[in-house]
Image (cartoon, rainbow, N blue to C red):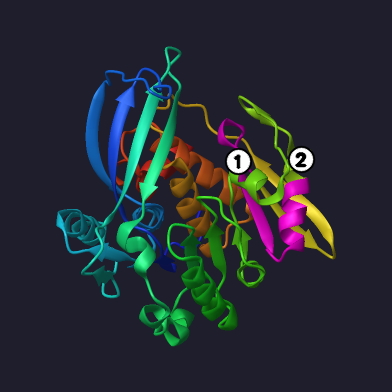
Amino acid sequence: MFHNTVHRPRILVVGSLNMDLIAETDRFPVPGQTLMGRSFSMAPGGKGANQAVQTARLGCDVTMLGKLGFDNNGQALLQTCKDANLNTDSMLFDHDSATGCAMIVIEKEENGSSQNRILVIPGANMTITPEEVAFLEEEISHYDMVILQNEIPMAINTIVARYAHAKGVPVMLNPAPAAELPAELLGYITYLSPNETEAEALTGVHIDRHEDTADLIAAQQAAEMLHQQGAANVLITLGQAGAALFTWKNSICFCSHAPCFKVDAVDPTAAGDSFIGAFCTAVCHGEDALSALTFANRTASLTVTRMGAIPSLPTLDEVLDAMK
């Protein structure tokens, strides 16, 4: 794995930073119901920060560009980024908006499995302006990959992706939370990576999944639709069924599928972000599709065995040890 370990990929993440408020319960309350929960904690997160920290812990040189409020949560998130050795020189701050936060409820079932429900209050994340990212038009050529998500303004994603595309820098877009994607933006995307729920929201195609199996024919149908809309490659994560990467050559679709690793899941909150960061790391190291998928699955499998978002993200040594 990673034959060229001397090279440290340079990654730019433009995205969100949130403080996660995490409640654990035996079951989700129904409307109008009050339940007693098991525990409560706070942890740094946000899809942008999660993916940035994961790529950094896997050995990449990572720049994080996002927007924080002038409050305690903002200072804590900034320190978290610095502690993870992220370059924060381009971090933005908003005097009027609070730092973003996410309210996460985790249901722990009797069989040991878990699921979550997440409500994001974006705050300062949604106040990034085109003028604040204009400097990237020239700077973006210094990076090996750009990673984006849908927790900042879509217009900012489009501008940054346009800059990257013009300089030949590959772009990963994780379209979460699901939202309509502009045709211009899709035309700049090298890797579009929804989960099966987001893929259905974007295409209307339901991908049936039962435990560790998924309908790959339906997944390919969804991927074909997204490819026709402009995405060069489509990577669909399928929970316990692993992940499938769809690529095209001479109009022929090729599918690489890697199953997930069986673990006792404690908190699935950052699993998708961990997967994205690991996949991008592997691609920047020149790994083939199946190797990149396997590495990403193994990384995410370690993440779900720990509580929290950023605190749960593994290091490269931990992943390589697990892969042995």
Q: What element carries label 1?
A: helix
Residue 283 percent coordinates (x, y): 55, 60
- Position of 255 relative to 217 (above/below): below
Q: What amino acid is at disc 2?
A: Ala
How many discs mark residues in the rendered view? Answer: 2
Residue at which label 2 appears? 218
Residue 184 percent coordinates (x, y): 64, 73
- Residue 33: which disc? none
Residue at 52%, 46% (x, y): give it.
295
Magenta residues, as a range? 221-244
Between residue 256 and residue 208, name the one nearer to us.
208
Magenta stretch encompasses residue 118: no
- Tell which residue pokes out farthest to the left in this image: 72
Q: What amino acid is at disc 1?
A: Thr
Q: Is residue 166 left or right of residue 187?
A: left
Give the mark nearest the N terminus, 1 or 2. 1
Q: How many other residues sit within 10 Å of disc 2, few (<14), some (14-19) or many (≥20)?
A: some
Q: In which quarter of the image is residue 265?
A: top left
- Position of 196 relative to 225 (above/below): above
Residue 59 percent coordinates (x, y): 37, 59
Q: Is residue 235 left or right of residue 96?
A: right
Between residue 44 and residue 103, name the one nearer to us.
103
